[in-house]
Image (cartoon, rainbow, N blue to C red):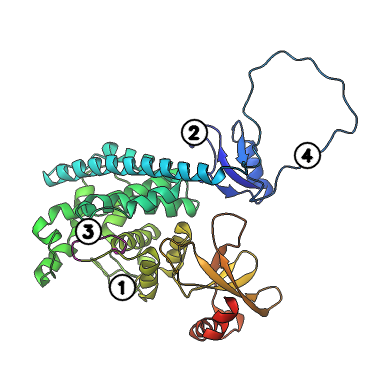
Amino acid sequence: MYVKSFSGSWFAHPFWRAHFVLRSAREVERVRHSGLDYVVIDDALGIGLETTAPEKPRAPTVRAKQRPRAPAFVARRPSRGWAEIERARERSDRKEASALLTKSKKIVRKAFAEVRLGRAIRVEEVAPIVDDILHSIDHNPRALLSVLRLKKKNEYTYLHSVAVCTLMVNVAIHMGRKAEEIRDYGLAGLLHDVGKMEIPDSILDKQGPLTDEEFREIRNHSEYGYGILSQSAEVPDAALDVCRHHHEKMDGTGYPFGLSHDGISTVARLGAICDVYDALTSSRVYKDASTPTQALAAMWSWDGHFDRELLFTFMQSLGVFAPNLIVRLRRNRLALVLEPTRPNQQTRVLAFYAIREANWIAPEEVTIDDSLATDGIVGLADPVEWDLGEHDAIVGRLLSPMVQSQVA
């Protein structure tokens, strides 16, 4: 059953996403016992309601007049005008997201300015940003994430913090983290670069290459930030961890301590991914922004830099994937992620192998989205484990002109 939304406050229900599929009796029971008045489902995207007529007609019962309640379920969206309604809703959501970013930028600028004056971070002043972002993502994650990519070059210092907060919250929700942990992840993203307030603007805003001495000073920002955040007892451990370790790498070549693998916590690994992704997809005075696909492709190619499993989870949270990955689909097929042919295009894959039958199939192009109307990406696949050969050989085979002409 495809759930579109819930009644009441988003804090009231046991799920962090408003749009998802109920796949088990346990999930149904969680909804039944959540205290909600109603949920809205879409039976065009999932299983609808089953109605059973009573065995025998019953005499009408006279009841006292009651206030009408919201319907138990609203099953189907209207067929006419739906596209117009969705476009209007999307415009409204983007407007609200823009207002949220403007408000968040002011709060972050003020908090960071106080740090430059030698004052400690006051968590109670910045924490509401995380709650607002949580609410925005629960309502429409695509709106906020897309608006964040439009930040201007001169807004980077402050909106980068808001963007990393948003990305951290989004992936934490996707991973099913508990409410308190999601907020800690968000606060960690918001404060991860606070140490840069100890770096002179002449270095932060320099358009040309940094000298060795300037680069060493930049590298100190993680320790500066850790010292700043340590002054406040309200800062959660996750925020301290991410601030200090978001430049560590899985192969031990990062800084400030050269930690590797198990020496780096999950939240710090995610902080590194979110930090770099936003940096790559942002315009700076010295570079143009990469597209999300370009950024993820580059990040995937940096062997030893990121936790690959978490990087793939991050892609799933965005609904954007690096091209040429071989993935497993919900409908028990293997597929190759294709390059987008236009900006902001939904992810396309080329399904080529049936898992149950253990057979190659005629390549079929599939568009991936959030609904059940199409297939979905559920995991990575190593072709060697399926006795299909090496990754690069399969990619070359599937992208050959002959195969592509058959697909077209």
Q: Mark 1 highlights which residue?
A: 252
Pointers 4 and 3 in contact (C-beta within 8 Å): no
- C-alpha gap between disc 1 and disc 2: 44 Å
Can residue 37 be seen here? The reply is yes
Q: Secondary structure at mark 3?
A: helix
- C-alpha gap between disc 4 and disc 3: 59 Å
Mark 3 or 2 closer to N-term? 2
Pointers 3 and 1 in contact (C-beta within 8 Å): no
How far across and down, in percent of the image, does residue 198 sit? 13, 53
Relative vertical location of residue 25 with respect to residue 363 in this rendering, above or below: above
Q: Residues within 10 Å of mark 1 (few under 14, many from 20)?
A: some
Rendered image: mark on residue 222: 3
Taking 156 as reference, is 181 left or right? right
How far across and down, in percent of the image, does residue 210 sit? 12, 69
Q: Which one is closest to the eye, mark 1 or mark 4? A: 4
Q: Is residue 282 magenta?
A: yes
Q: Secondary structure at mark 2?
A: loop
Q: Residues within 10 Å of mark 2 (few under 14, many from 20)?
A: few
Q: Secondary structure at mark 4?
A: loop
Magenta segment main secondary structure: loop
Q: Which sits in the foreground, 408 or 275?
A: 408
Q: Mark 4 highlights which residue?
A: 51
Mark 3 or 1 closer to N-term? 3
Q: Which one is closest to the eye, mark 4 or mark 3? A: 4
Q: Mark 2 highlights which residue?
A: 9
| Amino acid of disc 3 | Ser
